[in-house]
Amino acid sequence: MTLFDHLVGKQSDRWRHGEPSALAVLWEKRLDGRSKQAKRIAALITSYGEHLADIFGIEIDHDPAMKATVLRLAELECLCEIQRAKALRGEPCDLVQLTRTEGLARRLRKSIGLDSPPV
């Protein structure tokens, strides 16, 4: 089973009722599961899912709204990491946008009860 299949379900599971799941369509359009960014996002989703299960007993696989929120948070964290790395390498980077994105990720993380950054 690939990482993509783990996140959105196998092809047969996605098309079981004639329609793909919303998350499957969203993920397929956003990222190729083989890229470094997709792997990092998947790792963040797993990490956040484990933290939510440990702290609050929330299983993100059973709560579509929480799963979508965690996906959004993982994508924001990945974008922040990419932009910060660019800035540290001295490449052109919009630092104002980086600061805004980090603030958005921090607020989203706090809104779901996670006060620490990802590991």
Image: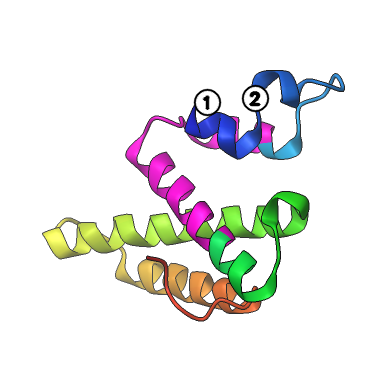
- The chief SS type of the magenta part is helix
Q: Is residue 92 left or right of residue 110?
A: left
- Residue sitting nearer the eye, 78 or 42: 42
| Residue displayed at 33% across by 60% down | 81
What are the residue bounds of the magenta stretch? 24-49
Give the residue pinned by disc 1. 1
| Crowd class of label 1 (few under 14; some 14 to 19; many from 20; radius 10 Å) | few
Residue situated furthest right in the rendering: 17
Q: Residue sitting at 82 percent across and 24 percent down? A: 19
Residue 45 higher or lower than 15, as above or below: below
Q: Specify whether 73 is left or right of 13.
A: left
Give the alpha-carbon distance from disc 1 to disc 2, as whole Å. Answer: 8 Å
Q: Amino acid at mark 2?
A: Lys
State the count of labels.
2
> Are circles 1 and 2 on residues that touch, CB within 8 Å?
yes
Q: Residue at x 85, y 19 (%)?
A: 18
* x then y, percent, for residue 64: 76, 51
- Residue 12, image x and y in percent? 72, 18
